[in-house]
């Protein structure tokens, strides 16, 4: 499921959650809700292209990934994973779940 919410700065963000409730992918902030919704559609589209995923390891040997749009801009960033295989499983989860995920608004 995609959740749309407002952060403390009043910007709209989305997160893609797995069926177990774990966050798989989180967005940057958007000033307009419509832009946030466009970001979700971009995730749906770009998640089906392996070349749009960027797998990254940090200095602490932990892993995460970014999903990028056609223009190279980051659409979403994953949580931190302990292993490369965990991050790759996260990518597969985005590829599987994003196209069919419902959108739920959590707006106060």
Image (spheres, helix red, strand yellow):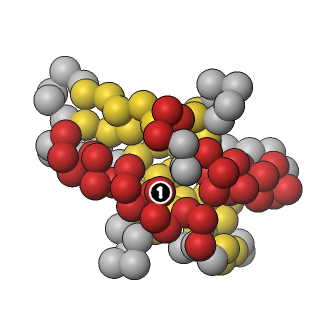
Q: Position of residue 93 (x, y in %)?
A: 39, 61
**Mark 1 surroundings within 10 Å by alpha-carbon count, few (fewer than 14), some (14 through 19), many (20 or more):** some
Q: Is residue 17 visible?
A: yes
Q: Is residue 8 left or right of residue 50?
A: right
**SS at badge 1:** helix
The residue closer to the viewer here, 88 or 34, is 88
Q: Residue at x 74, y 45 (%)?
A: 30
From this view, report whether residue 11 is shown above or below residue 54: below
Q: Is residue 79 left or right of residue 85?
A: right
Residue 49 location, quadrant: top right
Q: Quadrant of residue 60?
A: top left
Q: In the rendered view, would you say 53 is above or below 18?
A: above
Q: Residue furthest top?
A: 59
Q: Looking at the image, is 104 positioned above or below residue 75? A: below
Q: Looking at this view, is 8 or 45 the one in front?
A: 45
- Residue holding disc 1: 95
Q: Position of residue 67 (x, y in %)?
A: 52, 40
Residue 23, how many percent across, how many down?
41, 62
The quadrant of the image that shows the N terminus is: bottom right
Question: x%, y% of residue 56?
Answer: 32, 29
In this view, 62 is above or below 46: above
Q: Nearer the viewer, residue 54 or 74?
A: 54
Left or right: where 75 falls relative to 32: left
Instruction: Choose between 27 and 12: the one closer to the eye.
Output: 27
Quadrant where the image shows the C terminus: bottom right
Which residue shows up at 27% across the image and 46% down it? 87
């Amino acid at each position: 499921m995609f959740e749309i919410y407002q952060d403390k700065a009043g910007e709209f963000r989305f997160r893609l959650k797995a069926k177990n409730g774990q966050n798989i992918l989180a967005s940057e902030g958007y000033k307009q809700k419509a832009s946030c919704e466009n970001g979700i559609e971009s995730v749906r589209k770009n998640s089906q292209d392996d070349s749009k995923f960027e797998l990254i390891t940090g200095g602490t040997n932990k892993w995460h990934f970014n999903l990028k749009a056609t223009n190279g801009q980051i659409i979403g960033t994953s949580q931190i994973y302990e292993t490369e295989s965990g991050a790759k499983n996260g990518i597969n989860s985005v590829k599987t779940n994003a196209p069919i995920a419902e959108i739920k608004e959590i707006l106060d």
